[in-house]
Image (cartoon, rainbow, N blue to C red):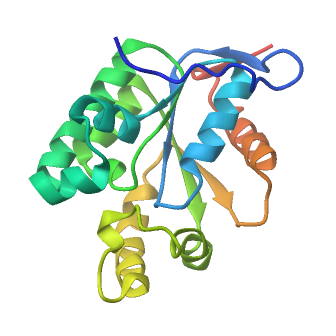
Amino acid sequence: MSEKEQISGQKAAGPAPGKLKKTIVMVGMMGAGKTAVGRALAARLNVPFLDSDHEIEAAANMTIPEIFARDGEPFFRQKERQVIARLLEEERGVLSTGGGAFLAQENREVITAKGVSVWLDAGLDVLWNRVRHRDTRPLLRTADPYATLRGLYEQRVPLYAKADLTVASDGQAAIETMVDRVLDALKARPDVLEWK
């Protein structure tokens, strides 16, 4: 059984706005807020919060940077595909994925078939402000991390744009405001969230 983070003591006041029928999968660049917004969204909906990177680390008993260093990115991406497919099968909730997860067509297809993808669309400057002081991003361990981030951003945005739903992340909105934006976007998907 998956080690999942049950949201306890973090529940929003009042009842959940509706019944979740499919897993909501948060996608987007590193620093877009997938984990923070996903965790708060799960609390609001009173459903489990799942994190594919956390699941990979728990299974390997290593951090993502350690996995990249020891086994390389292709190995990590293979494990990531397996974990995402498993989490989508196990139970409904809110799933946060790593920044590169949505790039693989196989992941995009299984996410669309079993859940709904929500792209947190943050601009390059917002992302840079959020990640530049952290040493936990193996892809940014380069001589010029900003240029690396810009290259990743330019390469990935066209693929993120294939997400089922897009929610703007301007770097100014509070997490709860971002949750409201995601819920507003989900109103277009009654197959995912049945509103009360």
In the displayed structure, 193 sits above or below 182; it is above
Q: Where is residue 105 in the image (x, y as percent from the top left)?
A: 25, 46
In the displayed structure, 92 sits above or below 77; it is above
Of residues 110 and 137, the one nearer the viewer is 137
Q: Where is residue 99 in the image (x, y as percent from the top left)?
A: 40, 55
Of residues 33 and 26, the one nearer the viewer is 33
In the displayed structure, 128 sits above or below 41; it is below
Question: Which residue corresponds to the image point at 30% horizontal and 68% vertical from the top-left?
Answer: 139
In the image: residue 14, left or right of residue 146? right
Q: Please count the marks in the image.
A: 0
In the image: residue 69, left or right of residue 136? left
Q: Is residue 72 visible?
A: no
Q: Position of residue 121 (x, y in %)?
A: 58, 60
In the image: residue 174, left or right of residue 71? right
Of residues 29 and 22, the one nearer the viewer is 29
Question: Which residue corresponds to the image point at 42% horizontal and 67% vertical from the top-left?
Answer: 135
User: For the view shown, which residue lies furthest in the right direction?
Assistant: 14
Q: Where, quadrant-wise, is the C terminus in this rendering?
A: top right
Q: Is residue 131 visible?
A: yes
Question: Which residue corresponds to the image point at 35% horizontal and 32% vertical from the top-left?
Answer: 55
In the image: residue 68, left or right of residue 175? left
Q: Where, quadrant-wise, is the N terminus in this rendering?
A: top left
Question: Which residue corresponds to the image point at 38% horizontal and 87% vertical from the top-left?
Answer: 147
Q: Where is residue 108 in the image (x, y as percent from the top left)?
A: 33, 42
Q: Quadrant of residue 38?
A: top right
Q: Quadrant of residue 172?
A: bottom right
